[in-house]
Image (cartoon, helix red, strand yellow):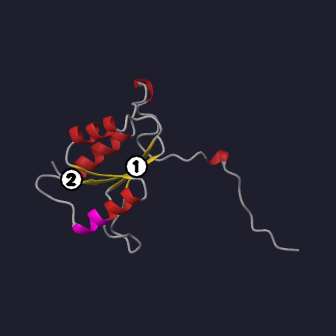
Amino acid sequence: MKESVLVTKILKELRTYKNSFAYKNVTATGYSVVGIPDITACINGQFIGIEVKVKTNKATKVQLVIGSQIIDAKGLFWVVRSMKELKENLDNIHAEKKPKELENEDSDEFRLDIDNFEEFEDKEEE
């Protein structure tokens, strides 16, 4: 399986859990940081950096250093090679699945409820 396919499957799975948020980090910009995990997630307030690897690929030294910094900051860092491994890690943190009828809610795209945001205007000082 290609890494990009596994990343997509992991993102879809993470979005079926209660109190979860996950996204794929984009690495091809001039503003990216080398070594940032492929996926950033938060489940029940727990920050999780997920580095995805397939076959015999290994995390690079810089990825492991970033992972260590995440752990030092009280987050979790996982190197995941399969859906089975992902689910084992999620079981270890006691993550709960959403009810079946809510599993796909907001899972296909990031949605922002604009109606709940107030417009900010620059006010000139008097």
Residue 114 belongs to magenta span:
no
Within 10 angstroms of label 1, few (less than 14), some, or many (20 or more) residues?
many
Q: Which residue type carries mark 1? A: Ala
124 in relation to 2, above or below: below
Q: Is residue 126 visible?
A: yes
Q: CA distance from mark 1 to mark 2?
A: 17 Å
- The image's mark for residue 49 is none
- The image's mark for residue 41 is 1
Residue 62 belongs to magenta span:
yes
Tag 2's secondary structure?
helix
Q: Which residues are magenta?
A: 61-65
Tag 1's secondary structure?
strand
29 in relation to 71, above or below: below
- The image's mark for residue 3 is 2
Closer to the N terminus: mark 1 or mark 2?
A: 2
Q: Which residue type carries mark 2? A: Glu
> As drawn, is 49 to the left or to the right of 79?
right
What is the x, y in percent for residue 23?
40, 51
Which of the 4 image quarters holds residue 49?
Answer: bottom left
Of marks 1 and 2, the one in the foreground = 1
> As drawn, is 101 to the left or to the right of 67?
right
